[in-house]
Image (cartoon, helix red, strand yellow):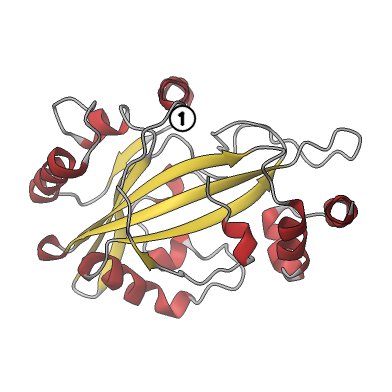
Amino acid sequence: MYHPYRDGYRVLPALKKLREPPFCVDDDLERYLHEKREASKVQRVFLEHEMNAEIYDAFASFIEQQGPAHVTRPYTLRSVAMQVQEDIAIQRIEDGRDWLAAVHVCFPSDWRPEEKIGKPLREIHAPIPGMNLDASYKLAETMVHHGPFMRFVWSVVYEDRINFHPDQPRRSFDPANPNVFVKVERQITWGFPDLGAALFILRQFIVRPPDVDLPALAVACINMNEEQRAYKGISDELIGWLQQRGQS
């Protein structure tokens, strides 16, 4: 299990070279696939904008070489995404611009894929406090021409579920029933430099009690600034509870 909150909260990309397979397969596979089927009934999960056949062909070759053994043909984005635990997106660059060219996302973290498709990283990341938006195109270039990379983002949540689409009601911290989980998103980027494209491979993990490192989580939340706490839904009440539990 991953515990990136032990390193604090950061908005910098913090890219690390990928040292593990791009896809995970574990005992939760059937749960993830069931949740994807359910999400696809009520959410827009697949969208594309200015895509081309060459990139989809490169994606198919990538899955043939790097995809999980249980994935079956055809190796289209729609078919593969409904067979793996990860969500998949494709970012393109061309003539000094970048844009989100395709997504198959069933488990967004408080965002709607239909509002992000066709947009550059600068706009996609605009709601995140502290992001260096001026470096967004450089980041897109790095994803395409270097790597593959791995990074993590995390959030505190209060229920054991995978899909945090904004249309679904979300529980807040309840001190009378303090179920504190950490949702960790592992983000893999894999570039196709000859085609000016890069894959995002997004896997959601839930760190459940008692595996959550409460003292480390308390420190990470305390060290956020006010804007970051508001963005992540971190209340003073939660911080007080974490501090109390971390000292016990």
Are there few (<14), some (14-19), or many (20+) residues within 10 Å of tag 1? some
Q: Nearer the viewer, residue 10 or 97?
A: 10
* Kind of residue sitting beneath label 1: Gln
Q: Is residue 71 left or right of residue 47?
A: left
Q: Residue at x 70, y 51 (%)?
A: 213
Q: Is residue 22 above or below residue 126?
A: above
Q: In which quadrant of the rendered view does residue 192 lie?
A: bottom left
Judged left or right of residue 13, residue 246 is right
User: What percent of the width, then of the height, locates residue 230?
Assistant: 74, 59
Percent position of residue 156, x then y: 68, 48
**Mark 1 highlights which residue?**
43
* Image-based side of 70 in relation to 174, left or right: left
State the SS at label 1: loop
Q: Nearer the viewer, residue 185 or 45?
A: 185
Q: Position of residue 124 (x, y in %)?
A: 45, 60
Locate residue 244 relative to residue 74 in the image: left or right. Answer: right
Please report the residue visible at 58 percent of the width from the left and 53 percent of the height from the top.
3
Q: Quadrant of residue 120?
A: bottom left
